[in-house]
Image (cartoon, grey):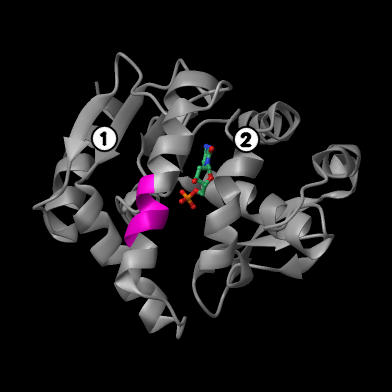
């Protein structure tokens, strides 16, 4: 099968990673969750006291960027590729509401983006990759053969995220989650470096009233059309 780059960008909690993972499996492509990379740098910043509610020390974080090693490793137990930060599997630690609260701030730092974008370009240079994020179709792979831009209403996205967090045993209220979704939309779309915008040639995809199955069917079908073109 021809190898192409498939970019799936869009707002937070639009189910990008669910559909991207399934698509990569069906096409036997590599899946790269770029949000996990920004989350892992955020976790590093929290664990090293570079960011908190009261004060930030982003200079120290920027100076430490060379000490942050990120790697995706396949976990045969979960059958997923999971992110490792300096040798530790942090796949669970990066999904908390605490990390979600700070990640937009970290993702707005140009030095952080430069480092992660370079790594992402390296991971996709052989093609045969499904990459999800915010700037894949605009900055990381502007020449990707196929691009989707996913969105859904903030309320619907907060519903989905709230359920996920409850399943993981987090003590959160629906209001907190909705507020986080809205704040991240605002920060991700208004930052100066690589803001969240739809690439001109991306296919818009609103999944507010669509189930996983229907989404996958449409995106898979479109991918096969482009691959076999
Ligand atoms: O997809 P996610 O919610 O796990 O992403 C976490 C944050 O990382 C999101 O709020 C914005 C940022 N991000 C980004 O700026 N660029 C990307 N390519 C991926 C994520």
Return the x and y of residue 228 as percentages of the image width and height: 26, 27
Residue under pointer 2: 120
Q: How many marks?
A: 2
Q: Quadrant of residue 220?
A: top left
Q: Looking at the image, which residue is at 41% across and 74% down?
A: 165
Q: Is residue 21 visible?
A: no
Query: In what quadrant of the picture does the N terminus appear?
Result: top left
Q: Is residue 88 visible?
A: yes
Return the x and y of residue 54 as percentages of the image width and height: 72, 56
**Mark 2, mark 1: which one is toward the viewer?**
2
Residues in magenta, as a range: 178-182
Residue at the extreme left of the image, as rendered: 209
CA gap, disc 2 and disc 1:
21 Å
Query: In what quadrant of the picture does the C terminus appear?
Result: top left
Q: Looking at the image, which residue is at 46% across and 27% down?
A: 190
The relative height of residue 86 versus residue 119 in the rendered view (above or below) is below
The relative height of residue 124 versus residue 37 in the rendered view (above or below) is above
Residue 125 among those drawn in magenta: no
């Amino acid at each position: 099968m021809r190898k192409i780059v498939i970019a799936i960008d869009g707002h937070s909690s639009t189910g990008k990673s669910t559909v991207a993972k399934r698509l990569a499996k069906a096409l036997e492509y590599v899946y790269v969750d770029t949000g996990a990379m920004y989350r892992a740098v955020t976790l590093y910043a929290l664990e090293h006291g570079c960011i908190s509610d009261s004060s930030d020390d982003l200079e120290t974080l920027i100076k430490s960027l060379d000490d942050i090693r990120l790697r995706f490793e396949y976990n045969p137990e979960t059958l997923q590729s999971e992110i490792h930060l300096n040798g530790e599997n942090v796949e669970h630690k990066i999904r908390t509401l605490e990390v979600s609260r700070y990640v937009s701030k970290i993702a707005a730092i140009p030095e952080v983006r430069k480092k992660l974008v370079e790594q992402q370009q390296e991971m996709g240079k052989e093609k045969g990759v499904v990459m999800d994020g915010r700037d894949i179709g605009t900055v990381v792979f502007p020449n990707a053969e196929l691009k989707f831009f996913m969105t859904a209403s903030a309320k619907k996205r907060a519903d989905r995220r709230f359920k996920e967090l409850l399943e993981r045993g987090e003590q959160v209220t629906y209001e907190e989650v909705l507020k986080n979704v809205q704040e991240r939309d605002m920060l991700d779309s208004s930052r100066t470096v690589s803001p969240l915008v739809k690439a001109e040639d991306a296919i818009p995809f609103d999944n507010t009233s669509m189930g996983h199955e229907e989404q996958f069917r449409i995106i898979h079908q479109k991918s096969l059309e482009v691959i076999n073109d």
